């Protein structure tokens, strides 16, 4: 099976309108923006049938709600339960939160409002608050610090998982590896999207990463074995697994450890490459200012 991500030529898929109508009816938001739309293309070859091409859409939405309440988890859970036409990632924020100067998602909001697709605008809704992103130099500094913290946490969880296996605590090992992958994804999302996600749901985090790179998700879906391991990791924060101890043995635990141990260097490499690109932007902005003063 081959899996890849492309931007579809048409954004007018029939089920997309259904999704927007469901969210509007249930939550009466002020605005809904689409900040990414991807399609996962799978080609399946089998000795029992001809090659098949299957398309699975992913919609990434920013929902602005009235007031100041936090409803992101409610909207995401509703979309997961009631919409089966495609995968959906929802970032939901209250209108009042946009006014806070200390909002950690300023860069994300600025990007979505300027380049995202406005899908819904409630009648009589107040104008969208203008959000200014941080200057490139300050943003680069924040991104580096943020990634360093998440990377350290992820490596700490990985070390603890190895210790858990040594002590025979296999279910604990899985839970710690779940946290390690989540920390890496949270760091990636902040570095590439300037978004500080609050979820630790691995499925949502990995599909959010697909907005800026196919590499994290393809790392876990590249083989049938890795895909199976990922499914188990996604369930590892479920108390039922703890109660049943999941029947892991040393050999299978090593497979999970190897999988996560390979993902963390990939995430770190991606971030370092992005920091280098951001540094070029900083240098270019500095050169333009210098040139402007020379001719000013």
Image: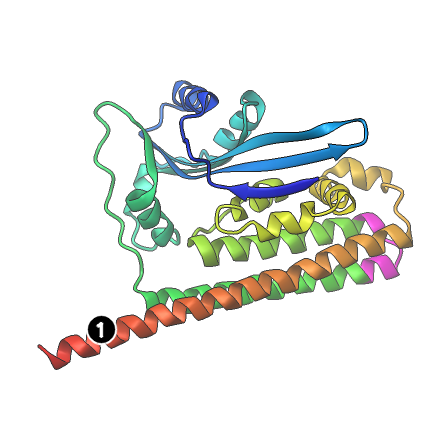
- List x then y, in percent, for residue 32: 36, 32
Q: Quadrant of the N terminus?
A: top right
Q: Residues within 10 Å of mark 1 (few under 14, many from 20)?
A: few
Is residue 67 visible in the rendered structure shown here?
A: no
Query: Can you say whether 77 is above or below 194 in the image?
Result: above
Residues rendered magenta in the picture: 163-171
Q: Is residue 249 visible?
A: yes
Give the image location of residue 267, x and y in percent: 59, 60
Q: Quadrant of residue 150?
A: bottom right
| Residue visible at 85% across and 57% down in the picture | 165
- Please give the name of the residue rendered at 86% of the width and 50% of the height, measured from the top-left corner: 252
Q: Which residue is mark 1?
A: 288
Between 36 and 44, the residue placed more toward the observer is 44
Find residue 121 and report its horizontal and vertical position in percent.
28, 28
Q: Residue furthest bottom?
A: 294
Residue 262: percent from left, percent from top: 70, 60
Q: Is residue 80 left or right of residue 167?
A: left
């Amino acid at each position: 099976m081959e899996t890849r991500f492309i931007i579809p030529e048409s954004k007018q898929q029939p089920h997309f309108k259904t999704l927007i109508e469901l969210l509007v009816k249930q939550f009466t938001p002020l605005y809904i923006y689409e900040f990414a739309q991807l399609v996962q293309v799978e080609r399946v070859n089998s000795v029992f049938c001809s090659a098949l091409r299957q398309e699975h859409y992913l919609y990434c939405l920013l929902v602005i709600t009235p007031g100041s309440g936090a409803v992101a988890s409610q909207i995401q859970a509703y979309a997961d339960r009631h919409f089966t036409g495609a995968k959906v990632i929802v970032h939901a924020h209250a209108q009042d939160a946009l006014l806070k100067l200390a909002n950690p998602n300023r860069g994300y909001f600025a990007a979505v409002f300027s380049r995202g697709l406005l899908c819904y605008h409630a009648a009589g809704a107040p104008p969208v608050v203008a959000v200014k992103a941080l200057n490139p130099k300050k943003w680069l500094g924040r991104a580096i610090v943020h990634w360093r913290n998440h990377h350290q946490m992820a490596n700490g969880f990985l070390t603890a998982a190895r210790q858990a296996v040594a002590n025979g605590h296999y279910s604990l090992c899985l839970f710690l590896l779940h946290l390690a992958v989540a920390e890496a994804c949270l760091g990636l999302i902040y570095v590439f999207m300037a978004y500080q996600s609050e979820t630790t749901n691995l499925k949502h985090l990995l599909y959010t990463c697909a907005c800026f790179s196919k590499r994290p998700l393809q790392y876990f879906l590249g083989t049938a074995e890795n895909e199976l391991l990922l499914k188990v990791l996604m369930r590892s924060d479920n108390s039922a697994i703890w109660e049943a101890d999941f029947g892991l043995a040393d050999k299978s635990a090593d497979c999970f450890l190897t999988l996560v141990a390979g993902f963390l260097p990939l995430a770190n490499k991606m971030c370092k490459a992005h920091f280098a690109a951001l540094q070029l932007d900083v240098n270019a902005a500095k050169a333009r200012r210098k040139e402007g003063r020379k001719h000013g």
